[in-house]
Image (spheres, rainbow, N blue to C red):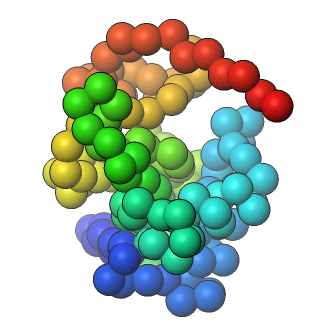
Amino acid sequence: MHSFKIYNNNIKPDANEKQEIVDFLHNHLGEYGDPKEHILNCLEFATMESLSAAGGFVLAVLEKGELLGVTIINKTGMAGFIPENILVYIAVHEKTRGKGIGKALMEKAIALAEGDIALHVEPDNPAKRLYEKLGFTNKYLEMRLHR
């Protein structure tokens, strides 16, 4: 049986837990991942260790002390026209994919988040089907200007 561990502005991960979460996401996000520095910045935003942080939370799924999945949700500081939360990262250990860990992680994250949640998903990402089953819809086409 798996258990959940949450980190937020009141319960912060120690240095070892941070490193484990960052390494886990970096390794298991695969082609959909970001550099470790970006993942760490996101984690610190969620736990309000960043000066500009609006907060959020990190949710980990563990079984017998082993990390099986992690998601990071950041608060946007907005509401209505922009969802109150954005799911920035979610990954499940490759050996447990297809066993309901991702769904359990998403359901718990949805229950913990206050307000609406946005997420970005590549069109070919297999997790897209799970998000749709959980009620996420594709209302907009995202466009970015990189400088």
Q: Could you tell me residue 73's position as x and y percent? A: 41, 53
Name the residue: 49% across, 83% down.
13
Q: Is residue 11 left or right of residue 41?
A: left
Q: Is residue 28 above or below residue 19?
A: above
Residue 2: horizontal and vertical position, in percent?
Answer: 30, 68
Image side of residue 108 versus residue 19, left or right:
left
Question: Going by the image, does 110 lie left or right of 120?
Answer: left
Residue in the foreground of this view, choosing between 66 and 74:
74
Residue at 62% x, 87% y: name it.
16
Say whether residue 40 is visible: yes
Does 147 sit left or right of 122 as displayed? right
Depth check, front residue: 55 or 17: 55
Q: Quadrant of the C terminus?
A: top right
Judge whether 38 appears above or below 44 on screen.
above
Residue reaching furthest to the right: 147
Q: Is residue 103 visible?
A: no
- Quadrant of the rendering where the N terminus is positioned: bottom left
Relative image position of residue 117 (x, y in whole percent):
31, 38
Does residue 107 lie above or below 56 as drawn? Answer: above
User: How many numbered marks does the figure carry?
Assistant: 0
Q: Which residue is at a point 64% across and 46% down the rendered structure image?
A: 29
Where's residue 59, x and y in %? 38, 64
Quadrant of the image occupied by residue 6: bottom left
Could you say which quadrant of the image residue 115 lies in?
Answer: top left
Residue at point 35%, 84% (across, down):
11
